Amino acid sequence: MGLFKKARDAAQQGMVHVHGAGPIDPAAFGGPSTRSVAADDPIWAPINGISLQDYAALARDAQARGVTDEAGMIALGSERGWDPADTKAALDGWVQRMGQSMAVGQQFRTLLGY
């Protein structure tokens, strides 16, 4: 292991990297960014108390139970004790963040088990 590899690895700790991204960042054209995102970036902050991990667990539960619409997702959130308005905000917010950064979408798919 060379010095430069060690330095690069140290610099990348705590980052979520986008895999398979091309050389052009789609964010320049209104798409999601392919840039790596630091683990402490605000994009990872819970939305109304619902983290990306919570959202993925809700999505897995919905998938297992055949729920395919927003109303059903909100109902499942209510079963978890989540306020319906908070669940709606989280559903919309996490989808919006996935549209901003491919790293969020990739982390979501990882949490889903894909």
Image (cartoon, grey):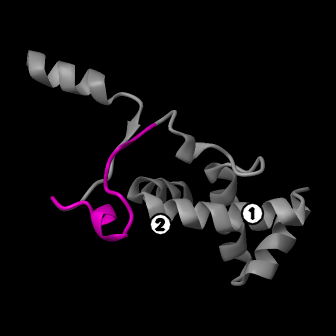
Crowding near the residue tagged with mark 2, few <14, some 14–19, many ≥20 C-alpha atoms within 10 Å: some
Can residue 18 be found in the magenta stretch? no
Q: For the residue marked with disc 1, what is the amino acid?
A: Ala
Element type where label 2 sits in the image: helix
For residue 1, say whether it is visible: no
- For the record, the magenta segment spans 23-38
**Cα–Cα gap, marks 2 and 1:** 15 Å
* Residue at (61, 61) in percent of width and height: 94
In this rendered view, identify the residue nearer to me: 28 or 98: 28
Q: Position of residue 47 (x, y in %)?
A: 70, 51
Near mark 1 (Cα within 10 A), the count class, few <14, some 14-19 or many ≥20, is: some
Residue found 32% across the figure and 52% down from its top:
18
Q: Does 30 lie within the magenta span?
A: yes
Residue at the spot of label 2: 99
Q: Position of residue 58 (x, y in %)?
A: 71, 63
Please name the residue shown 58% across and 67% down the image: 95
Vertical order, 2 against 59 (above or below): above
Task: Name the foreground residue: 19 vs 86.
Answer: 86
Whether residue 19 appears in this view of the structure is: yes
Q: Nearer the viewer, residue 100 or 56?
A: 100
The image shows residue 59 at horizontal and vertical percentages of 66, 67
Upstream in sequence: badge 2 or badge 1: 1
Label of residue 89 in the image: 1
Secondary structure at badge 1 equals helix
Measuring from the top left, give residue 14's x and y in whole percent. 41, 30
Q: What residue is shown at x 86% (from left), y 58% (from top)?
A: 80
